[in-house]
Amino acid sequence: MSKLRPARSVRNILSQSWSRYSVRKPKKNYIKSLPHTNLMVFNMGMDKPNYDLLLTLNSDQNVQLRSNALEAARQVANKHLERELVNNFYFTVLTYPHNVIREKKRATGAGADRLSQGMSMSFGSPSSIAARVKAGQPILRIRTVSSAKEVARQALKRASSKLSGTYTISMSQIAKAS
């Protein structure tokens, strides 16, 4: 596995999205090989009708989140919820990484100036995949009972520490269906 560049190098949304990939017409693609996503599980816990509290992690700014960062946030939140609430929650990841991040691999060391092509042919090759998140967009959602409010809040706080950017946690009551 190749070493990833720091998140600060890809978190800003600077240009258009590169996500065109087709299985049927590979020659018409902008992207010849699609990088795999680390995020595979989107729904965790048990979905019960007695949940009355909804907590959401919302982005405060436009940011690009790599799939490995979303997976790290999912794992830390899910582990905390499973340890504290044991099947008394329903946790969902709401964003999906579509955007392909390109990277121009550079040669370093002695004689690198003769090997690399500088800025010519600098389009780069696909290195990872990311989700583009707009300000105010929800990223993670937890449904649970009111008595578990602080545990769910703490889980989202831990998850936000794994993501680039700033986030707010919103809380609302779920209306019971009669």
Image: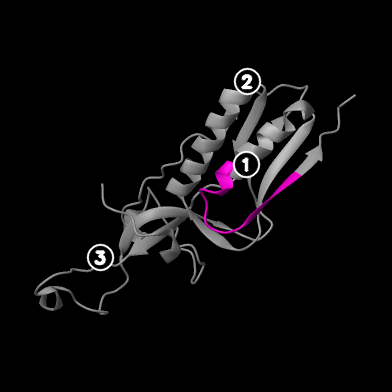
As drawn, 46 above or below 138 = above
Residue 105's disc number: 3
What secondary structure is marked by label 1? helix
The amino acid beneath tag 3 is Lys
Q: Residue at x 43, y 46 (%)?
A: 68
Q: CA distance from mark 3 to mark 1?
A: 35 Å
N-term-proximal mark, 2 vs 3: 2
Confirm whether the magenta stretch covers residue 56. no
x and y percentages locating residue 94 in the rendered image: 61, 43
Q: Nearer the viewer, mark 2 or mark 1?
A: 1
Q: Residue at x 56, y 31 (%)?
A: 80
Q: Nearer the viewer, residue 32 or 4?
A: 4
- Image quarter where the C terminus lies is top right
Q: Quadrant of residue 137?
A: bottom right
- Number of residues whose C-alpha sits closer than 10 Å to that of mark 2, classed few (under 14), some (14–19) or many (20 or more): some
Residue at label 1? 156
- Number of residues whose C-alpha sits closer than 10 Å to that of mark 1, classed few (under 14), some (14–19) or many (20 or more): many
x and y percentages locating residue 26 in the rendered image: 33, 54
Residue numbers of the magenta segment = 158-170
- Number of residues whose C-alpha sits closer than 10 Å to that of mark 3, classed few (under 14), some (14–19) or many (20 or more): few
As drawn, 70 above or below 124 = above
As drawn, 89 above or below 127 = above
Q: CA distance from mark 2 to mark 3?
A: 45 Å
The amino acid beneath tag 1 is Leu
